[in-house]
Image: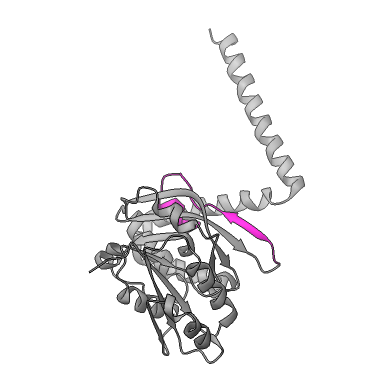
Amino acid sequence: MNVPKLSIITINLNNANGLRKTIKSIIEQSYIDYEYIIIDGGSTDNSISIIEENVEKITHWISEPDKGIYNAMNKGILKSKGEFLLFLNSGDYLFDENVLQKIFNSETNCDFLYGNIIFKTQNGKLKREIGPGSSEISFYSFYLNTICHQSSFIHKSLFEKYGLYDENLKIASDWKFLLKTLVLNSATIKYMDIDVAYYDMYGISSTQKELVKAEREKVLNELIPAAFLKDYKEFEFDWIRIKRIRKYKFTTLLYRLSQILLIRITILINFFRKIFYK
């Protein structure tokens, strides 16, 4: 049996226009060693018609009620046969027709591949995000941030080894999976400086910030020892305060001047030490 290199999984619920855009970006790819799976949650809009229009390019699809985003994503995982999995939900779409070719032309001997994501904000602006980039992945990388699944290629063996997404969470289950596999179990990861996809920020995880925060807190308390977590929380307070200060142009200038002044003072202190303490 031919095993595809990649399984692309799209979940959808009543987002016909977004689904059409997502499907188009996938079926126009120059790379063809993939299967395409659509998990629809029982849409009542025009979504099913759009799927049927493209059914020859879709490996498997279902439309039935589900128990939420991660239940739908887990259905896709269980149906998939590819070596790597890419979750590209309705409304999200690949950067251009050569993205997958660029990704899989490179060495893929690792558990996790990821590239850059382009956020489409609610005011129509575009923002490019590289995540941790080429920096070493650590607990800090995920304590304050994450890697978007729209720009991630996850080896299926990770789901087989560490389990599927936690369906008790509504938003932060993919974040929990990354924390568990990449940080706590040192799965191998490779960053590629390639723009992978556009991310539609009208989705649930980008609009319900308080729920994101609450679920991440729940995950951290479940996975991380309390004493270790306490130190990071204290550090987070300082980091957020500095970030807020640097947000404003005037205070950014003051911050940079203070940093320069501090360096100059340190140099002078060392200079006088050398003179008076010979």
Residue 187: quarter of image: bottom left
What colouring method underlies this structural image?
Answer: one colour
Can residue 168 be seen in this snapshot? no
Residue farthest to the top, as pictured:
278
Can residue 78 be seen in this snapshot? yes
Identify the residue at horizontal 45%, vertical 44% (top origin): 135
Question: Which corner quadrant holds the N terminus?
Answer: bottom left
Residue farthest to the left, as pictured:
1
Apparent side of residue 121 relative to residue 177 in the rendered image (left or right): right
Which x, y percent locates residue 122? 67, 69
Q: Judge by depth and name the residue closer to the eye, 3 or 241.
A: 3
- Give yes or no for residue 128 being in the magenta stretch: yes
Q: Judge by depth and name the residue closer to the eye, 216 or 276.
A: 216
Which x, y percent locates residue 102? 45, 52
Identify the residue at horizontal 65%, vertical 53% (top origin): 244
Residue 39: quarter of image: bottom left
Query: Does the magenta stretch mainly form a helix, a strand or a loop?
Result: loop
Q: Judge by depth and name the residue closer to the eye, 76 or 68.
A: 76
Q: Which span is picked out in magenta? A: 124-146
Which x, y percent locates residue 243? 62, 51
- Give yes or no for residue 72 being in the magenta stretch: no
